[in-house]
Image: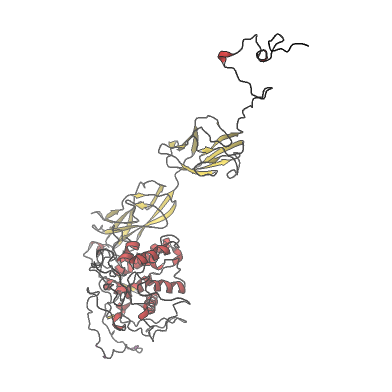
Amino acid sequence: MAPDIGRRLRRGATSGAVVAAAVAALAASQAPEAIQPTTDNSGGDRAVGAGDTAPPSGVGSATGDSPYYTELPPLKTPNKPGKPGTSVNLPVIMGPAEAGIPASVLSAYKRAEQSIRSTDPGCNLPWQLLAGIGKVESGQARGGRVDANGTTTSPILGPALNGVGFANISDTDGGAYDGDKVHDRAVGPMQFIPSTWATWGQDANGDGKKDPNNIYDAAQAAGLYLCANDRNLALRADLDRAILSYNRSTEYLNTVLSWFEYYKRGTHQVPDGTGVLPVDRSDDRRPGGFPSPTAPFLPAPTSPAPKPGAQNPKPAEPSKPGTTKPPTVPTKPPTTDPTPPPTTPAGKVATLAVAANGKLTATTDSDFAKTPRVAALDASGKPVSKVSVRFEIVGATDTRFAGGKTAVTATTTAAGIASSPALRAGEKTGAFTIRATVVGRTLAAADFSVTVTERQADTLVRVGDDPLSAATGTAFDQQVQVKATDKSALAPGVRVTAQIVTSKTAEGASTEGPTFKSTSSRTATLTTATDGTLTLKAGDLLAGDKKGTYYLKLTAPGGGTLFVELDVTEPATTPTPEPTGSGTPEATPSPSTSPSPSTSPSSSAAPTASSSSATPKD
């Protein structure tokens, strides 16, 4: 099963626009062939397009169709009116906490949306979709039971995928993620199976690990999966396909959509660990049921579930004007206060501000002279030490922190200052952002403007002035060496454009004449060495097949320009010796046997009248 999933993932990756966008199934779910649409869900099967069919259990689902958890058995009419024309049922609000999302979990969803919108804007990923899936998969990471870095305080595991009620997937990770060396299990708040995580896991919190139990890492991977295959989630058809590819179950599709719509209508942040937990298992309603996982997925609910046959309490009716009724479920009022308690360093921070280097610049393939620095301050403006600060590169760039990382975590000093590691520019030019945030908090970020420009040279000078000449059909056997400088200083690493042109005023490369051996064309890109020189060795330029005068034009960013004349001639001709009277070419005497000046060549070859070979007269 796992190798087959891998092949499907690789095929999908070829159609991605930017990153390897391939099918990575993420959800722990029920087998689609055993599910029928619920009678009170008006969504029904409309999400499956014409000709679409659900594959066999486990195919295309990285969780192997293990059972998912939900608070909606069955879905009921919402107590908020729906938008005109919508048919997705929304869950009944069971108190204010029902709309609350734990702070770290909410931060992870929003950060994933922001990151993916910068790299794949055409996907239009909404964070509320990640929230809908996270609600169904793990009750928002067990109500936000995560540490300061966003890692669950204990593993969230699905049942063993042993083929009983769902896919049969043998162990692929040696139990490293799921603790099971016989069968795989779905892992973490977004429920990945290990074989899928091995391919699509992310390190979104910059701690150097790709951890499926970390909500930041898992949410980023989930977002990339939903955007796979060039999907545009603003289109309903693509949205449905994304969710169905996550889990091929119509019931799952409708459940996620209902929470998606619910969160789009409004939500708020609650402290980590105080989110509402699921109180019912979806597999309890499946015909035949599922075996319970050997490791408990969620802690026991704080209040007992209603016994079979017991009548559910009716939802509270709207209060009449002038009267008030207490909420049916006592809850704490929504809070926008930081998640960590004030006794922790992160909890004391009121502001994260740019301390230095708000604007950073560097040239391609070079180290930045400075790095971002931020200050963590409390409400009174005093510095806060020992605060974990995450620096993240946001935007389309190949600039990286030390070690090739796009996100890193640093800790504030006693002065409340945190600095990122060294930063190195890549080959791509342009502007982007480095964003600093307090780990586990939703405070306003501190942004740094970063720009990478081309290395420049304002002057190009040829070393030596020997004329360059070659016959058609041959190569130039002379070396061309050029020195590049910028403001009189040697300019290493400058990308120089080289062209063969017909004149110093010609626009564009010539269509005939010499070519570059390396490119087999009349255009090439050359880079100056560490000493600022650029060299074309003997044989690097081919003369072509048409004689004439051409020019090697070299142009560098920064204005440096140089023309080097190239002369292409006809091949030299060798004279053909004239034949003798007998038709045999005359032999050329060597210097040592040359005839004396008084003897003509013809006298030694023609007989004389006194010769013994003369014919007697009649």
Relative vertical location of residue 418 with respect to residue 45 in this rendering, above or below: above
The answer to if 257 sits in the magenta stretch is: no
Main SS of the magenta part reads: loop
Residue 220 position by quadrant: bottom left
Quick one: 452 or 270, which is closer to the camera? 452
Q: Quadrant of the N terminus?
A: bottom left
Residue 233: horizontal and vertical position, in percent?
44, 70
Residue 159: horizontal and vertical position, in percent?
26, 73
Relative vertical location of residue 185 with respect to residue 204 in this rendering, above or below: below
**What's the residue at 23%, 57% (across, down)?**
386
Relative vertical location of residue 541 with respect to residue 345 in this rendering, above or below: above
Note whether residue 337 is visible. no
Quick one: 113 or 163, which is closer to the camera? 163
Residue 164 position by quadrant: bottom left
Residue 392 position by quadrant: bottom left
Note whether residue 8 is visible. yes
Residue 133: horizontal and vertical position, in percent?
35, 73
Quick one: 466 or 207, which is closer to the camera? 466
**What's the residue at 57%, 17% (across, down)?**
590
Q: Quadrant of the C terminus?
A: top right
The answer to if 323 sits in the magenta stretch is: yes
| Extreme residue toward the right, this view | 618
Q: Is residue 40 left or right of residue 441?
A: right
Q: Is residue 151 left or right of residue 461?
A: left
| Extreme residue toward the front, this view | 618
Read off the magenta span: 304-330
